Image: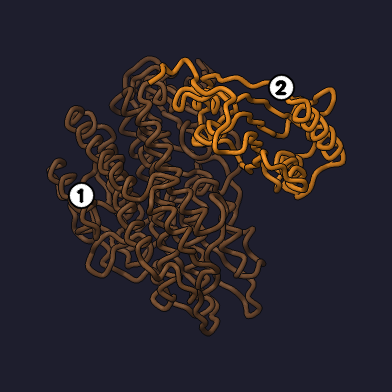
Chain colours: A orange, B brown
């Protein structure tokens, strides 16, 4: 067995399609539904090598799921203002732990994938700025605009093969 | 100088809790409280909605145990459409049971592997950076993989039966809306794509052996930590055996004497009342005939193990006998035995899932039963955390006019307060300060009851950790944050 510090699989094909997009959020809380809306939009033109998964929160067992993919995107709404309305940043494994059984962060999930399954998928966080967080269905105008920009940014990365 | 110690909120439980410990002038514990400070009021939200929406609406109480609320509500709504549990079709009854066993299995796996195992593997006095599942994964990779795989198995069964892992839908008024295909069933039996149900049974047995050995080497701590006498409540089947989906209610006292003798779940109102306290939004259920002080009961794994006279699956029954043989008591009142009891229940659920997966009825299409509509429905199940009651009343147009939910964590309100008091008396008493270790022991005592405060108060919220220390005059002496 390889030591847990190293990953024996890096960007190799698996039996799964190669890209996983995890949308995190709650469509009942207005702009907190951005992560799911992002997946809804991707699903309108499904790609063969792209899998989408809806999540209220990231949970520990998601480490097993992400370990099966070459590339993983974690898409979530952001409470903080972002200059372009969205950001796509590389994510790396880190042993953070949040004091809850649910609501783990992407870095912890990647850390568990590396530690438990010896897998290191290439990973990104997609943060999309929202404005409204009340008990309401539907996105605000600003969030909808930011969602469109984030989708364009995502497709640009996918197309470039980065 | 008297002091008040506040732990706000408690971590690694579902929701947001707060503990205050009041010391007298001599540094001795005068009082302690486990406060529930959130409130959402789901019982009111549901009013006015048509009854058929209830099994879907109430799932939003919680992201951890939505299946339990779905099934308890469904049982109540069955009665409103004039269908008693025994009149469901075999397919509907068995699919609901399969869903329920999968829910208990995955919920117990979450609690044991993700929440409790750091306390057991590293000790209640471990440094804070070790008291989490990430540290478990680093130091015990095999245990982490099994924990994740077992939870995933339960969730996959839920997804197959109810359509989604979280907030799926199976039950309809008087039945279910779908059955399993042969391919869906075989997925859990053949072991080709995922570890199969036989592996779940094998691993559950391993976990029971692990916790039994752990008790052997840590007996004094586990016997004594947060020990207190109490009553115990759960459903049982007609022979007194463990029953998680439908049976009658039985309660016993600390010595095993029956205090509530196998009453129909429909009669719960005759026997139970709920007290309130100014310092908590969570109520305190108790048996009316025993009164507020003596009538409260523990619920959940430890109570179910105490109340039933046998478990109707062979491996879990063998494990139950070994549990009581080790404990040396007819009734176990030691808080930390709840982890052992929880793992025996996982084994029982795995065995039950295997039986149901091999039953051809789950593949059939006789899904619903019709009846004559009534205005009242009561559904009680044994959820992972204990006895869960849903009670609805509707008007002639089918709109809900009354909703009463008594969730498992509410039944355990008194028990958790007693557990906190034990830690306060035995760990914090006469100490001039409070340490991380002391804080963790308070949390360990509460966590053993796997409380779901979101369910108990139906609350929304974030979970930072804040500890505050006050003197008698209300001056802040010390504070700590975790986030």
Q: Assign the N terminus of chain A to one quadrant of the image.
A: top left
Q: Dot 1 lies on which element?
A: helix
Label 1, residues with CA under 10 Å away: few <14, some 14-19, many ≥20? many
Residue A10 in percent (x, y) is at 56, 22
**Residue B214 drawn above or below residue B208:** above
Q: Is residue A3 left or right of residue B297?
A: right
Name which residue lies at 77% across and 46% down.
Answer: A45
- Residue B17 shows in this picture: no
**Residue B472 drawn above or below residue B277:** above
Mark 2 vs mark 1, CA separation in Å: 51 Å
Residue identifier under label 2: A89
Label 2, residues with CA under 10 Å away: few <14, some 14-19, many ≥20? few
Q: Assign the C terminus of chain A to one quadrant of the image.
A: top right
Could you say which disc has been placed on residue B320 in the image? 1
Residue B464 in percent (x, y) is at 56, 28
Name which residue lies at 51% across and 76% down.
Answer: B368
* Chain under disc 1: B
* Chain under disc 2: A
Residue B313 in percent (x, y) is at 24, 58
Front residue (pair B341, B225): B341
Name which residue lies at 43% across and 43% down.
Answer: B151
Is label 2 in contact with label 1 (beta carbons under 8 Å)? Answer: no
Q: Is residue B235 left or right of residue B254?
A: right
Could you say which disc has been placed on residue A69 in the image? none
**Residue A142 drawn above or below residue B135:** below
């Amino acid at each position: 067995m390889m030591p847990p510090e190293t990953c024996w699989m890096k960007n190799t094909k698996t039996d799964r399609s190669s890209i996983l997009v995890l949308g995190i959020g709650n469509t009942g809380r207005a702009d907190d539904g951005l992560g799911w809306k992002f997946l809804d939009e991707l699903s309108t033109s499904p790609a063969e090598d792209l899998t989408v998964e809806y999540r209220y929160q990231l949970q520990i067992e998601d480490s097993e799921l992400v370990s099966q993919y070459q590339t993983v995107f974690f898409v979530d709404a952001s409470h903080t203002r972002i200059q372009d309305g969205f950001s796509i940043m590389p994510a790396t494994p880190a042993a953070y732990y949040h004091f809850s059984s649910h609501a783990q962060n992407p870095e912890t999930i990647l850390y568990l994938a590396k530690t438990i399954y010896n897998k290191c998928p290439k990973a990104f966080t997609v943060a999309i700025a929202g404005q409204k967080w009340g008990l309401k269905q539907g996105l605000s105008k600003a969030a909808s605009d930011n969602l469109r920009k984030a989708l364009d940014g995502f497709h640009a990365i996918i197309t470039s093969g980065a | 100088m008297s002091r008040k110690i506040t732990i706000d909120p408690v971590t690694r439980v579902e929701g947001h809790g707060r503990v205050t410990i009041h010391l007298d002038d001599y540094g001795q514990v005068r009082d302690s409280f486990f406060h529930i400070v959130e409130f959402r009021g789901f019982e009111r939200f549901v009013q006015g909605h048509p009854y058929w929406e209830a099994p879907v609406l109430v799932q939003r109480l919680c992201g951890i145990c939505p299946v339990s609320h779905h099934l308890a509500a469904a049982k109540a709504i069955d009665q409103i459409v004039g269908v008693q549990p025994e009149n469901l079709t075999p397919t509907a009854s068995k699919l609901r049971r399969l869903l329920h066993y999968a829910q208990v299995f995955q919920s117990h796996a979450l609690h044991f592997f993700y929440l409790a195992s750091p306390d057991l593997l590293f000790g209640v006095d471990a440094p804070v950076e070790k008291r989490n599942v990430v540290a478990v994964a680093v130091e015990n990779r095999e245990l982490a993989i099994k924990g994740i795989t077992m939870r995933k198995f339960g969730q996959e069964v839920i997804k197959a039966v109810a359509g989604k892992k979280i907030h799926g839908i199976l039950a309809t008024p008087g039945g279910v809306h779908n059955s399993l295909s042969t391919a869906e069933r075989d997925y859990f039996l053949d072991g080709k794509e995922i570890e199969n149900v036989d592996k779940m049974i094998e691993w559950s047995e391993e976990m029971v052996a692990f916790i039994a050995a752990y008790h052997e080497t840590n007996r004094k701590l586990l016997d004594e930590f947060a020990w207190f006498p109490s009553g115990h409540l759960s459903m049982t089947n007609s022979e007194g055996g463990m029953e998680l989906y439908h049976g009658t209610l039985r309660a016993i006292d600390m010595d095993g004497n029956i205090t509530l003798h196998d009453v129909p779940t429909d009669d719960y109102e005759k026997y139970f009342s709920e007290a309130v306290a100014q310092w908590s939004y969570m109520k305190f259920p108790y048996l009316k005939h025993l009164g507020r002080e003596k009538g409260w009961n523990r619920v959940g794994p430890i109570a179910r193990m105490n109340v039933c006279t046998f478990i109707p699956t062979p491996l879990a029954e063998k494990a139950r006998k070994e549990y009581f043989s080790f404990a040396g008591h007819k009734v176990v009142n030691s808080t930390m035995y709840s982890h052992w009891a929880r793992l025996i229940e996982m084994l029982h659920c795995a065995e039950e899932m295997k039986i149901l997966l091999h039953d051809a009825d789950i593949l059939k299409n006789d899904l619903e039963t019709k009846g004559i509509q009534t205005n009242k429905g009561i559904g009680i199940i044994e959820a992972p955390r204990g006895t869960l009651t849903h009670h609805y009343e509707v008007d002639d147009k089918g709109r809900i006019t009354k909703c009463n939910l008594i969730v498992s964590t509410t039944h355990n309100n008194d028990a958790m307060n007693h557990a906190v008091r034990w830690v306060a008396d035995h760990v914090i008493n006469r100490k001039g300060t409070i340490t991380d270790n002391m804080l963790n022991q308070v949390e360990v005592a509460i966590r053993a009851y796997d409380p779901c405060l979101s369910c108990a108060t139906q609350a929304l919220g974030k979970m930072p950790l804040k500890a505050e220390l006050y003197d008698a005059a209300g001056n802040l002496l010390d504070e700590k944050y975790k986030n």
